[in-house]
DNA sequence: AGTCCCCCCATTTTT
DNA sequence: TGGGGGGACT
């Protein structure tokens, strides 16, 4: 068979990876080096050149988005679709195994998935029942503890317990949490992976079946795997199967949530015959951008080593702008953005990246003022929205009345006269009888354990769910969703709230019906009964495992705003890295340990390598954070980029700008742009150098008010920052 | 039961 | 500065 079309378009290294005969292969794929391309072509190669069956291929990714993209690209390359091939996320695939082998995994058949929000609520409830001091041990911290243990593959019973308060308390909560999950038939995200791993270990015949099936295992973003994910892979691969992992140690930015870069080294230990292929040719960025990235990342100690290069030219220098404050920074960025757009470019080819979400506000304000459309990534995803989660909780109750999480959520939403006292009473009955909240409700009503008023209210809830359940049994999925939305009073509940928010919520509820209508599960065989609970259950699983796009796909051409973390994997012609300041980026929480700092540096590396043609970096001399103004030094990362790659932009009138980065100022060639911020009705502007009779020379950082009444903030060389009223302080402008 | 107010907190986020 | 959560008050 002619397989040349699979290899022809690739470079030597890519070809080496795609057609490599080695059983175990580690591909170190630099940013923009065609990583996904290699994975997709590798699969094509297996199918065509090696005549592998689609059934024998397992491809694992981290996000649903990349799983979809990979599947799509394979199908378009091969002009065929492959139903037997498993392409999905670790969680998606593990979940699929658990649905099939629920018995062997020690689960109930209709187990439900808890998302982070459900999990936190459950932990809170447990802490309350254990009388844990919330001030000392916040639920969030307990949740974090539980998740990190699960990431490491540890259950409460496996943890050595030292007699310190912290471990003792955490273990107590963890244990109670495990019991609550088991009782309610619930598993959280970490548990999905943990159970799937245990499924292998405890059921040799199941493991053997899948080991025999998946001859070819491919893993994307390997540097982001945590301990349990790697363990799961290793066991599945066994000694016979092919395992190809693709990753980039320089782009590992999720250490804080359990990802282990060490897995890359460990891979070479566990599979000592593994061959390593490096993809270093970059097809994305200019040489200037790559040089900056290479230089920056070379400051990290523990690296496998990699140097990106391109056949393309140098391109433009990286522009560096020193803003007076965050408003000036935002204005500068939006002005450049406007230029970009006026030059006939698309707004959607430009992105503003920042370290923390809080930075987006100022940028949004500036974009809004300019009337420039923008789109923010991140924030609440569709299936995580309050109103959607409420509606889903009703759907969950249709399947399983004993779902305590769902009961807690909607027993009084919309309000039906079941208050805190009543709920507490139900909880205590449930505890005493060791039964679900639903059963406790029934008991309370039947045995008249509460006031008639409360009893009636609870009865109303029970009857509502029964009614919904009965009606739903006759309906198809989308009709079920519609019925629930219309018969629970959720719409009226939100209408009462009023305002723009309420309207959006109601629209979302309508959108849920559409989503249900469009739902088809590729993992489920054709001819599935649309009215069955199993189909509804599959829909609920999808809602938990794939939280949906952040925003409805807007067609308008818009500037992209996102954190550096969410930018991973994306590329833009024009990129702004905003807030390049010590304490913000690198963030102050990570600055004092090497591991943290190196991860910040990798994050910066990710940011730089997002840019295709032009990169801007900016920092502000003063920034308002948490309500107070801080003076900021430029990020050390700026200094880790060679001078000749940088072009420092200055305001026209600001002569001899101050800077904290004194060591290197003057060596960068500076461009000038106009667009000063003037203090209204005065001849002063921000950034201007002034002299004061007592304090000496300084630079204007900020102002309030106008004319003679204006106050200005001056950062004096000798005495630091001061606020002065213009009519009193005699400031002299330095030319 | 619902509203209001105060206090506390403040990296990054996928599944 | 601003959002969310919890407690207190009506």
Image (spheres, coloured by chain):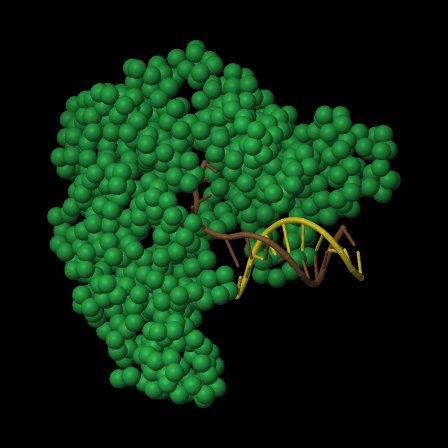
Chain colours: A green, B brown, C yellow
Q: Residue drawn 33% across and 79% down?
A: A697
Horizontal relation, residue A510 to residue A268: left or right = right
- In this rendering, is residue A525 above or below A556? above
What is the x, y in percent for residue A491?
65, 51
- Nearest the viewer among A358 and A302 is A302
Placement of A25 over or under A609, stated as above or below: above
Q: Viewer-proximal residue, A223 or A66?
A: A223
Quarter location, residue A68 = top left
Identified at 15% across, 47% down, the residue is A310
Residue sitting farthest toward the top: A205
Q: Position of residue A53 (x, y in %)?
A: 30, 20
User: Residue at left 24%, top 50%?
Assistant: A296
The front one of A261 and A535 is A261
- Which residue is pictured at 21% across the width and 71% down the height? A671
Q: How many marks?
A: 0
Q: Nearer the viewer, residue A725 or A144?
A: A725
Does residue A76 appear anywhere in the picture?
A: no
Q: Quadrant of the N terminus of chain A?
A: top left
Q: Quadrant of the C terminus of chain A?
A: bottom left
């Amino acid at each position: 068979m002619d397989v040349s079309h699979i290899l022809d378009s690739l470079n030597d290294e890519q070809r080496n990876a795609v057609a490599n005969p080695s059983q175990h292969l580690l591909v170190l794929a630099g940013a923009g080096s065609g990583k996904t391309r290699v994975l997709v072509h590798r699969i094509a190669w297996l199918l065509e050149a090696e005549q592998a069956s689609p059934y024998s291929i397992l491809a694992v990714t981290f996000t649903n988005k990349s799983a979809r993209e990979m599947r799509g690209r394979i199908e378009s390359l091969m002009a065929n679709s492959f139903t037997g091939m498993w392409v999905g996320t670790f969680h998606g695939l593990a979940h699929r195994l658990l649905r099939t082998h629920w018995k062997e995994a020690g689960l109930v058949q209709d187990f439900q998935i808890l998302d982070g929000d459900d999990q936190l609520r459950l932990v809170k409830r447990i802490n309350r029942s254990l009388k844990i001091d919330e001030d000392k041990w916040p639920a969030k911290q307990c949740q974090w503890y539980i998740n990190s243990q699960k990431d490491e593959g540890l259950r409460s019973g496996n943890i050595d317990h030292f007699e310190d308060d912290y471990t003792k308390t955490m273990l107590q909560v963890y244990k109670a949490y495990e019991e609550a999950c088991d009782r309610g038939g619930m598993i959280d995200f970490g548990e999905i992976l943990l159970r799937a791993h245990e499924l292998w270990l405890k059921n040799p015949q199941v493991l053997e079946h899948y080991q025999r099936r998946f001859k070819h295992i491919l893993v994307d973003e390997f540097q982001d795997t945590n301990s349990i994910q790697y363990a799961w892979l290793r066991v599945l691969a066994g000694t016979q199967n092919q395992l190809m992992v693709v990753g980039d140690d320089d782009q590992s930015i999720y250490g804080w949530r359990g990802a282990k870069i060490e897995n890359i080294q460990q891979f070479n230990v566990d599979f000592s015959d593994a061959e390593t292929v490096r993809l270093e040719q970059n097809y994305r960025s200019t040489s200037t951008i790559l040089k900056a990235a290479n230089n920056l990342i070379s400051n990290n100690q523990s690296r496998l080593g990699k140097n990106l290069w391109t056949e393309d030219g140098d391109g433009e220098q990286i522009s560096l702008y020193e803003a007076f404050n965050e408003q000036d920074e935002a204005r500068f960025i939006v002005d450049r953005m406007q230029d970009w757009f006026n030059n006939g470019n698309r707004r959607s080819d430009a992105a503003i990246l920042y370290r923390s979400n809080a930075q987006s506000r100022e940028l949004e304000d500036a974009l809004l003022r300019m009337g420039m459309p923008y789109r923010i990534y991140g924030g609440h995803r569709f299936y995580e929205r309050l109103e959607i989660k409420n509606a889903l909780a009703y759907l969950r109750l249709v399947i399983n009345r004993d779902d305590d999480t769902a009961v807690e959520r909607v027993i009084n939403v919309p309000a039906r006269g079941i208050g805190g006292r009543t709920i507490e009473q139900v909880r205590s009955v449930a505890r005493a009888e060791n039964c679900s909240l639903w059963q406790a409700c029934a008991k309370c009503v039947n045995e008249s354990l509460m006031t008639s008023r409360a009893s009636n209210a609870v009865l109303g809830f029970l009857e509502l769910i029964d009614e919904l359940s009965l009606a739903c049994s006759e309906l198809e999925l989308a009709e079920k969703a519609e019925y629930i939305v219309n018969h629970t009073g959720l719409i009226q509940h939100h209408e009462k709230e009023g305002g723009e928010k309420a309207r959006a919520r109601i629209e979302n509820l309508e959108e849920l019906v559409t989503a249900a209508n469009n739902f088809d599960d590729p993992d489920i065989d054709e001819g599935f009964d649309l009215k069955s609970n199993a189909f509804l259950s599959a829909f609920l699983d999808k809602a938990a495992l794939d939280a949906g796009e952040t925003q409805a796909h807007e067609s308008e051409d818009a500037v992209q705003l996102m954190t550096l973390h969410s930018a991973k994997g994306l590329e833009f012609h024009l990129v702004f890295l905003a807030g390049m300041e010590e304490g913000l980026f690198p963030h102050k929480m990570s600055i004092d340990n090497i591991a943290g700092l190196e991860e910040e540096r990798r994050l910066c590396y990710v940011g730089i390598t997002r840019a295709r043609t032009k990169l801007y970096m900016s920092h502000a001399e003063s920034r308002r954070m948490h309500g107070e103004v801080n003076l900021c030094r430029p990020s050390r990362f700026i200094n880790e980029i060679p001078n000749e790659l940088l072009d420092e932009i200055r305001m026209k009138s600001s002569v001899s700008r101050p800077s904290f980065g004194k060591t290197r100022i003057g060596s960068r060639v500076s461009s000038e742009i106009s667009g000063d911020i003037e203090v209204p009705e005065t001849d002063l502007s921000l950034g201007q150098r002034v002299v004061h009779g007592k304090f000496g020379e300084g630079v204007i950082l900020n102002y309030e008010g106008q004319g003679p009444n204006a106050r200005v903030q001056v950062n004096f060389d000798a005495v630091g920052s001061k606020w002065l009223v213009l009519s009193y302080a005699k400031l002299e402008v330095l030319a």
